[in-house]
Amino acid sequence: MTDAAKPRGELTLRTLAMPGDANPAGDIFGGWVMAQMDLASGIRATERARGRVVTAAVKEMAFELPVKIGDTLSVYTDIDRVGRTSITLIVEAWAHRARYAKMEKVTAGTFIMVALDEDGKPKQVPEA
């Protein structure tokens, strides 16, 4: 990772890209990467909402580089906005390529989570 390229937000999830998550060429499926980003969004939003959340939308997501088998995927989350019942997060996925001692941003997206009450209805996000 160069000084100019730094992840935005808080490290929320780290996991290892395994062969079962890849195509025959060794590239990790984009859906797997997106699922890890969704998990990280859920973790961070649950902490902020102090309760249950669900994914309402994902927008502005584009893959810049592939994730390869053996890369450590690090997902960073930054709470961009808190609405009455929603939390908008900027989520970045970075691949730590240990073989080459570098870390590269592979994708980013905006995830919108909604806080729910015990009955599954939207509830107000508490003050910070």
Image: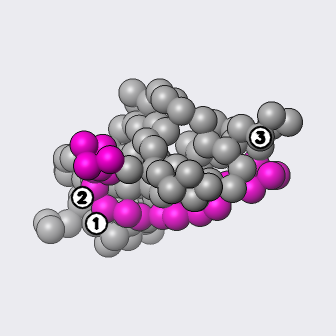
Query: Along the polypeptide, which appears first: circle 3 or circle 1?
Result: 3
Residue 15 lies left or right of residue 111; in this view the side is right
Q: Which labelled disc corresponds to residue 26?
A: 3
Q: Residue at x 31, y 62 (%)?
A: 10
Examine the image and state in which quarter residue 118 appears.
bottom left
Q: Amino acid at mark 3?
A: Gly
Q: Which labelled disc corresponds to residue 124?
A: 2
Marks 3 and 2 sit apart, C-alpha to C-alpha, by: 43 Å
Query: Along the polypeptide, which appears first: circle 3 or circle 2?
Result: 3
Query: Along the polypeptide, which appears first: circle 2 or circle 1?
Result: 1
| Magenta-drawn segment | 2-21
Q: Position of residue 101 (x, y in %)?
A: 51, 56
Q: How many marks do you count on the picture?
A: 3
Locate the C terminus by quadrant. Answer: bottom left
Depth-wise, is mark 3 or mark 2 nearer the camera?
A: 3
Depth-wise, is mark 2 or mark 1 nearer the camera?
A: 1
Depth-wise, is mark 3 or mark 1 nearer the camera?
A: 3
Q: Which residue is tagged 1? A: 48
